Amino acid sequence: MNLKEKKYAQYALVQEMMDTVDTVEKFDASCTREIAAQVSRAGRVFFTGEGSSRIFPAKNSLRKSKRWGLDLNAQTDGSWQSREYDLSKFALFFASNSGRTKEVTLLARKLMEQGNPLRFGLTANQDTILSKYCASTHVLNCGWEQAVAATKSVVEQALYYESVLWNIAGKDVKDALAALPEKIEKALTLDIPSEIVEWVKNAETIYFAGYNDGVAEELTLKTNEITRRKSDFLEGTYALHGIEEVMKEGDIIFWVDPIPDEYDKIQECLVKGAGVKVVAIADHDTPFLTIRTPEAGDFNPYVYLCAGWNVLVEIGIATGMDLDHPNRARKVGNEITE
């Protein structure tokens, strides 16, 4: 996709996706330094939100925390079910772009009433209802998005959470972070093979498989919002553990960063066994049709996510969708009224 052609430029969604490059360029990793010190002292952190405000931002940070071996109990869950948990000893991050998400706001209010002082809000708007119940609130620099599907805000939320971990671990990511905008731009503007779009048109279900770091799961949600197609997320190698029984010939799986040790099994069970089309999103060649992205090390998940957006835009345009306005989905899914 690009902003030169009208078929792309007419949509706020595409503009906001492309704005991600600037969002990453302007991100200041020091913005969480003081909060990171508080989180480190607590030794426990809980990330909550709903939909896109939680899936990739929180799960990307949980995976990084475990990979880096941080001495930190990092957890995430949706806000409504989290109301039954004892979170009195956790530092909590409440993400809601609008600052009006009902489940998130009510959980923040409950923790305030219980006296937990480590309540940190993350919104795209000033002076929100949520901010009344947080000890401090960070307002995203990317601003409020016009399209229903959240994009650039998702990336900034993820960087914000991950920067907490950088500051706790004392990681120097300056050079890698400086190189990320160019790699994201390449992922957003890659030419997507037309056969992928045709495969999707003919598929009953679109699957996304990959690590539980939020990338494949977030792309599953974006598929619903942007293409209005049925989509399912398959965590890890779940696709090889029974679900092939209900897959239909012609269905398609986008496998984010597929595991090389499982290439043969994917071919055997899914391609040959179920007649499923497999497309890889990876920074290396695979035996499958591959959307090849620039290598970005620890920042690969951001690049994979943006490449997936690129694919979904092409599908949405090819199938005549209004990319900015889904039929039923709302910008604020479940809004609190006070």
Image (tube, rainbow, N blue to C red):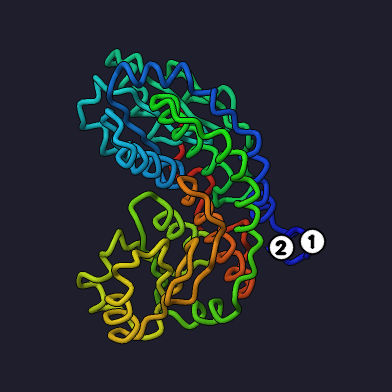
Instruction: Indicate which label's residue lies in the foreground, 2 or 1.
Output: 1
Q: Secondary structure at mark 2?
A: helix
Query: Residue at position x 43%, y 15% from top?
Result: 135
- Residue 208: x, y in percent? 40, 65
Q: Residue 4 got which mark? A: 1
> For the residues marked 2 and 1, what is the alpha-carbon distance in whole angstroms?
8 Å
In the image, taking residue 44 as reference, residue 104 lies left or right, namely right
Q: Image quadrant of residue 288?
A: bottom left
Q: Secondary structure at mark 1?
A: loop
Task: Give above or below for 249 relative to 222.
Answer: below
- Residue 76: x, y in percent? 31, 38
The 10 Å Cα crowd at callout 2, few under 14, some 14 to 19, many 20 or more, is: some
Query: Residue at position x 54%, y 23% from top?
Result: 30
Which residue was labeled with disc 2?
8
Task: Give above or below for 67 relative to 314.
Answer: above
Task: Give above or below for 223 relative to 333.
Answer: below
The answer to whether the residue labelled 2 contacts the one labelled 1, judged by CB atoms less than 8 Å apart, is yes
- Residue 33: x, y in percent? 48, 20
- Residue 249: x, y in percent? 36, 86
- Using the image as rendered, state which of residue 197 and residue 192 is in the foreground: 192
Amino acid tagged 2: Tyr
In the image, taking residue 58 as reference, residue 172 lies left or right, namely right
Report the quarter where the N terminus lies.
bottom right
Amino acid tagged 1: Lys
Q: Image quadrant of residue 326?
A: bottom right
Query: Residue at position x 56%, y 22% from top?
Result: 127
The 10 Å Cα crowd at callout 1, few under 14, some 14 to 19, many 20 or more, is: few
- Using the image as rendered, state which of residue 297 and residue 32 is in the foreground: 297
In the image, taking residue 169 as reference, residue 175 lies left or right, namely right
